[in-house]
Image (spheres, helix red, strand yellow):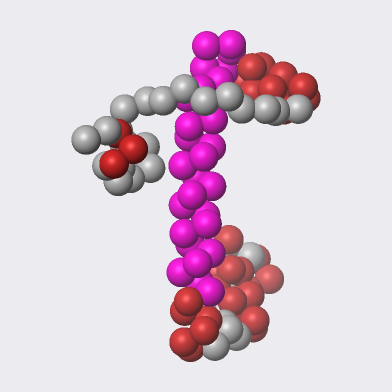
């Protein structure tokens, strides 16, 4: 059995080297943040966050398909409450 035969969740399992192409500006910005030796770890974390976002997008799409889209006014009210919008202070959503 090889590592390719095992279904590891994101962030788990042995490491594997690949070739990745990035624009010069993106690579420069990453290296400024983490140095030359931190690029792989940075990209690993970025990929994990993207997978989480993709999974969440799929979950929301499935929910919308079953229940319909969320009410924009209710979403705005919840967002204001979460962000502490002063114009909605005292109002509960």
Quarter where residue 33 is shown: top right
Identify the residue at horizontal 50%, vertical 67% (top origin): 58
Quadrant (top left/top right/bottom left/bottom right) for the N terminus: top left
For residue 14, above or below residue 60:
above
- Rendering coords of residue 47 (x, y %): 51, 40
Identify the residue at horizontal 64%, vertical 81% (top origin): 72
Q: Magenta stretch: dominant SS? A: helix
Quarter where residue 83 is shown: bottom right
Q: Which residues are magenta?
A: 34-61
Q: Is 48 part of what is drawn in magenta?
A: yes
Identify the residue at horizontal 59%, vertical 76% (top origin): 75
- Rendering coords of residue 85 (x, y %): 63, 65
- Rendering coords of residue 55 (x, y %): 47, 59
For residue 50, above or below residue 56:
above
Q: Residue furthest toward the bottom? A: 67
Q: Residue furthest toward the top? A: 36
Q: Is 44 part of what is drawn in magenta?
A: yes
Pick whichever, 75 or 59, lies toward us: 59
Q: Residue furthest toward the left? A: 1
For residue 54, above or below residue 50:
below
User: Does the image show residue 81?
Assistant: yes
Pick whichever, 38 or 74, lies toward us: 38
User: Does the image show residue 90?
Assistant: no
- Rendering coords of residue 38 (x, y %): 52, 17
């Amino acid at each position: 059995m090889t590592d390719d035969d095992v279904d590891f969740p994101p962030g788990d399992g042995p490491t594997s080297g690949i070739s990745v192409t990035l624009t010069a500006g993106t690579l420069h910005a990453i290296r400024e943040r983490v140095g030359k030796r931190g690029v792989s770890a940075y990209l690993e974390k970025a990929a994990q966050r993207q997978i989480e976002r993709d999974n969440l997008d799929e979950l929301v799409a499935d929910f919308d398909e079953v229940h319909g889209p969320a009410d924009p006014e209710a979403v705005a009210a919840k967002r204001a409450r979460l962000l502490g919008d002063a114009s909605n202070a005292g109002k509960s959503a």
